[in-house]
Amino acid sequence: MDVFSATAQWLADPMHWQSANGIPARLFEHVALSAVSLILSGCVAMPLGLWIGHTGRFSWLVVSSANAWRALPSFALIGLLVPFTTVIDPNLGFTLYPTLIAMIVLAGPPVLVNAYQGVAGVDRDLVEAARAMGMRERQVLLGLEIPIALPVLATGVRSAAVQVIATATLGATFGFGGLGRFIVLGDANQDNGELFGGVVLVAALALLTQALFTLLERRLVSPGLATHTAG
Amino acid sequence: MNGEPLVRWDWLFAHLGPIADRVVQHLYLAAIAVGIGFAISFALAALSIRRRRLFPLISILATGVYAIPSFALFAALVAVTGLSVLTAEIPLVLYTLVLFVPNIVAGFDAVPGDVLEAADGLGYTAGERWWRVELPLAVPLVVAGLRLATVSTIGLVTVSAILGNSLGGLGYYILDGYHRHFTTEILVGGLLSIGLAALADLGCVLLQRLLTPWAAARVAVR
């Protein structure tokens, strides 16, 4: 049987959709882990990036984290966390924590860098004008800089989300479930249907995430800015 | 794990030979990927500089490739090309393209138009102009792409360990250490692979100094 029909057959098998370790359960694990790490990471990286962009202080931190991000070896990072997380909890430290912590680290830099660039890139004349009109620093940030920077901020969140969804697949090698589990099992059992089924599901999820966040970005742009750029 | 010391130095010293072999394999896998990736990228970049309409298409393809998890790509290829160096190299090369092509194109785009006109005015042929003016001026951004591609490839080689014990370079130790609950092995694989990436990064910086001595001279004069 060729790879395509084996994959289609595996994906169409109702058993793989109903069993306790089936596709919906693995999909949920995958999305839940990604969402939790993105939110936790964003709660730190977003305010930090906005503050650095607004004040201009510590901008070297942003530059170095942008460089480190591209070079971040996820596989080595997850592995290196294992000896430390198992000390905290022998069970979850061996299955969940290494992947979770690595994904939190991975999601931070794109959010941080874009929050910084978005705010720092706001026309300085506008900021000066806002201050001259008597706006407080907080008002300048919330009422002017963030609305203008919103598309850039959203792009950062999107690239973090796509990267985390794609990389969380690695967690299956380190005891975490998620959609990568099908790839690991398919590889181990030499079951091409399951292996490629997993590959298709992971790639589809990554592309879907990208599409959803792109849609969200469009809706986030302030109408005033949208007509301004169009005109 | 298991109340053992963090690092079992006796194991480490007993395995220096195999560890060195893995380092060599790691560098070998990464070097092939970066070399082939660079050659293909240069051709793609040259093509998209000539024909501008191709560039968005190449960019979209490149972004699409990057969204596919390396893990999935490695595993999928085993079913096609079996357990061979080729299976490890195809994804590694593909990922380098994503980092190389935009940087090479940006490097040549950054050459100022009046410099090109001056070169033409001095009577350079197209080939001479490319070799003696455009290429040297594009070097900083090309090397920036080389740094990214080299460092990320050295990180990605570890993932190829999932293909089997015969591949993966230092990633083998990360995976084997995890399966055997053996911290020393994980640390050896993880820290050495990060160390290699750092050394390669340093090497790229030195390469840039060598290729563009005028940049250093300018700093020295100031």
Image (cartoon, rainbow, N blue to C red):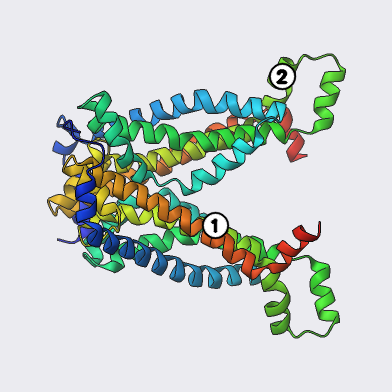
**Horizontal side, residue A94 vs residue B124: left or right:** left
Mark 2 falls on what kind of element?
Answer: helix
The quadrant the C terminus of chain A occupies is top right
Mark 1 falls on what kind of element?
Answer: helix
Q: Chain of mark 2?
A: A
Q: Give how far across and how far down residue A9 sits, in percent.
A: 18, 49
Q: Amino acid at mark 2?
A: Gly
- Residue located beneath label 1 in the image: B59
Residue occupying the point 35% across, 57% down: B157
Residue occupying the point 39% across, 69% down: B32
- Residue located beneath label 2 in the image: A143
For residue A37, what is the image quadrant?
A: top left
Q: Nearer the viewer, residue B85 or B205?
A: B205
> Would residue A183 be visible to someone looking at this image?
no
Question: How far is the residue under mark 2 from the one under mark 1?
Answer: 35 Å
Q: Give me the disc on residue A122.
A: none
